[in-house]
């Protein structure tokens, strides 16, 4: 099961005791998956969900809040044969009216089958806001595999619903953004820490701990990789510098010899040739009297400048 599926499975098992929270969660599900169909034989409220656990949760909410028990029918999706669609249909006018009134839902003027939240009274309390976000995620949300990246999103068919959800999420200090994807509007969160906050808001505590463990391991791996890369870069820099120093010393030895150098430069030149892998500190410790890193670096730089002068002279003679 995917990480997103595990989160939905956990949230689907949670059923609160407060009726107002259950209504808020049901309202969010209906905004995403509910359709109010106007048929010759009368109105019908149809709820279609592609996740079995979420369908069971919707059934439980209807039962506990409105004492409505309906069978869940199952069929294959018209788009993808391996995907099942779970449908709950409510046709009694008094039941439909009770649900719409309690959940503060009304038909969308642009899409008469679709429902929208016409009154934010249903999400006035923080506990109801949490329930509404939970229902929205169960109905049309997803979370990417945290091993690969951090991305939390809830998809809506129109901008109005997306803006409403964005406002509710931002009331918990989570910086949710909206992007249009084809005909849909996606409310999303990208940062790992903020996705942890979203799981906390929805009260997905097991998933939250799993995500935090993954984040800690990833941070440790990234930290180790940064240190290894830094150490590798330093080693390469030291090796390249030592190779250049030895090339300079050989050039001096082959052209003018060490006789033209003062004693300090001769000592460091001979030590570098003898110990090509030694650090500046180690070379300084071998000198008598001992010299610090800056002193060794100064002498090697003098040798490098002398080698560069010899190269220029050689170039001029060739011309």
Image (cartoon, helix red, strand yellow):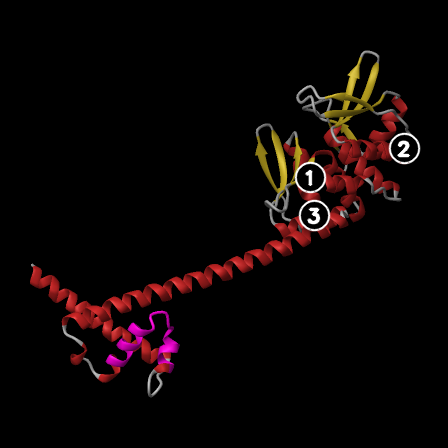
Mark 1 or mark 2, earlier in chain: 1
Q: Is 35 located above or below residue 262 in the figure?
A: above
- Mark 3, other Cα within 10 Å: few <14 / some 14–19 / many ≥20: many
- Judge from the rendering whether residue 50 lies leftward or rightward of residue 282; answer left or right: right
In the rendering, at what x and y percent does residue 9 appear? 77, 39
| Mark drawn on residue 198 | 3
> Which secondary structure, mark 1?
loop
What secondary structure predominates along the stretch shown in magenta?
helix
In the figure, residue 251 lies in which quadrant? bottom left
Q: Is 293 located above or below residue 76 in the figure?
A: below
Tell whether label 2 touches label 1 (CB within 8 Å). no
Q: Nearer the viewer, mark 1 or mark 2?
A: 1
> Which secondary structure, mark 3?
helix
In the rendering, at what x and y percent does residue 105 appear? 78, 31
Residue 10 part of the magenta segment: no
- Mark 1, other Cα within 10 Å: few <14 / some 14–19 / many ≥20: few
> Which secondary structure, mark 2?
helix
Looking at this view, is 60 or 23 the one in front? 60
Mark 1 or mark 3, earlier in chain: 1
Q: Residue at x 68, y 43 (%)?
A: 167
In the rendering, at what x and y percent does residue 71 appear? 87, 24
Q: CA distance from mark 1 to mark 2?
A: 29 Å
Tell me the residue that label 2 is attached to: 63
Looking at this view, is 269 or 296 the one in front? 269
Q: Which residues are magenta?
A: 266-285
Q: Nearer the viewer, mark 1 or mark 3?
A: 1
Tell me the residue that label 1 is attached to: 2
- Judge from the rendering whether residue 71 lies leftward or rightward of residue 130; answer left or right: right
The quadrant of the rendering that contains the C terminus is bottom left
- Judge from the rendering whether residue 26 lies leftward or rightward of residue 279; answer left or right: right
């Amino acid at each position: 099961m995917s990480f997103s599926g595990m989160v939905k499975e956990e949230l689907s098992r949670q059923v609160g005791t407060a009726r107002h929270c259950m209504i808020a969660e049901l309202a969010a599900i209906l905004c995403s998956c509910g359709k109010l169909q106007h048929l010759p034989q009368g109105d019908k409220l149809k709820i279609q969900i592609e996740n079995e656990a979420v369908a069971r949760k919707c059934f439980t909410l209807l039962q506990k809040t409105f004492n409505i028990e309906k069978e869940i029918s199952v069929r294959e999706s018209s788009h993808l044969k391996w995907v099942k669609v779970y449908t709950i249909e409510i046709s009694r006018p008094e039941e439909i009216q009770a649900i719409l009134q309690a959940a503060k839902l009304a038909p969308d003027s642009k899409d008469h089958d679709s429902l929208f939240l016409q009154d934010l009274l249903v999400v006035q309390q923080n506990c109801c806001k949490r329930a509404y976000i939970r229902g929205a995620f169960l109905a049309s949300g997803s979370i990417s595999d945290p091993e690969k990246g951090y991305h939390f999103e809830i998809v809506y068919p129109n901008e109005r619903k997306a803006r409403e959800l964005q406002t509710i999420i931002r009331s918990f200090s989570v910086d949710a953004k909206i992007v249009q994807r084809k005909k849909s509007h996606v409310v999303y969160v990208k940062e790992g820490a903020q996705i942890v906050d979203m799981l906390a808001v929805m009260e997905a505590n097991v998933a939250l701990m799993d995500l935090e463990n993954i984040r800690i391991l990833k941070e440790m791996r990234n930290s180790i990789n940064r240190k290894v890369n830094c150490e590798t870069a330093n080693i390469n820099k030291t090796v390249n510098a030592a190779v250049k120093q030895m090339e300079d010393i050989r050039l001096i030895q082959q052209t003018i010899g060490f006789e033209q150098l003062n004693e300090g430069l001769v000592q460091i030149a001979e030590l570098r040739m003898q110990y090509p892998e030694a650090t500046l500190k180690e070379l300084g410790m071998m000198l008598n009297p001992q010299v610090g890193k800056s002193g060794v670096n100064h002498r090697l730089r003098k040798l490098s400048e002398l080698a560069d002068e010899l190269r220029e002279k050689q170039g001029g003679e060739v011309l």
